[in-house]
Amino acid sequence: MTPRDNYIIENRGDALGIISDQSSSEEKFQNLTIGPILKLQNDLFIDVFKNYIAKHKNDFYTYSTEKKMQFIENSIQKDIKFRNSLKGMVIGLFTLAEYDDYIKNSSNLNKRMMNMLIERLKNNILLFDSQQAS
């Protein structure tokens, strides 16, 4: 393992979720790699999304909670440039071995990654409301 890989593993945190012998390779990758990275990068994702709101839909703060949730989902699913930027923030914290595993099944792992990120942003929706002036 390279010094970079060691640094990444040591600093991003432990696995999230349960991993068993019955877990699929995608589920293992999700719990061992994607989940800890999303948790580590949470504050960055929140700031990035606030910036996205400011640039694209400043009236977001007037929306109902339901409409805000839909906006979060649509912005990540339909804005390809934004989605690719978010993916890069996750992929940049893969080890070399994880990247090799990722490219073997990137399509399914990207879906898992974006769904997890959407849920994470939705779960943090109160942070968008309470800090709209910042």
Image (cartoon, rainbow, N blue to C red):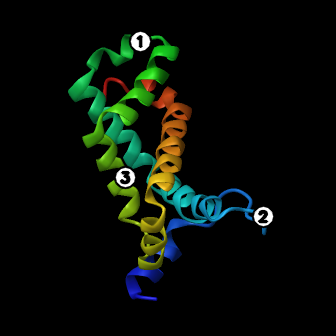
Is disc 2 placed on a helix, strand or loop? loop
**Which residue in the protein does label 2 denote?**
22
In the image, residue 66 above or below residue 16? above
CA distance separating discs 2 and 1? 42 Å
- Marks 2 and 3, the one that precedes in the sequence: 2
Which residue, given by chain and number where applicable, does mark 3 sit on?
A: 87
Q: Residue at x 41, y 57 (%)?
A: 90
In the displayed image of the protein, which residue is found farthest to the right? 21
Foreground residue, 53 or 97?
Answer: 97
- Image position of 60 (left or right of 69): left
Task: Tell me which residue sits at (54%, 64%) in the image.
Answer: 33
N-terminal-most mark, 3 or 1: 1
Point out residue 77 in the picture as x, y percentages from the top left corner. 39, 34
- The residue that disc 1 covers is 63
At horizontal 43% and vertical 80% (from top left) the residue drawn is 5
In the figure, residue 76 lies in which quadrant? top left
Kind of residue indicated by mark 1 = Tyr
Mark 3 is surrounded, within 10 Å at the Cα level, by few (under 14), some (14 to 19) or many (20 or more) other residues, namely: some
Identity, as a three-letter code, of the amino acid under mark 2: Gln
Provide residue 65's location: percent of width, then percent of height.
51, 16
Distance from Cα at disc 2 to Cα at disc 3: 27 Å
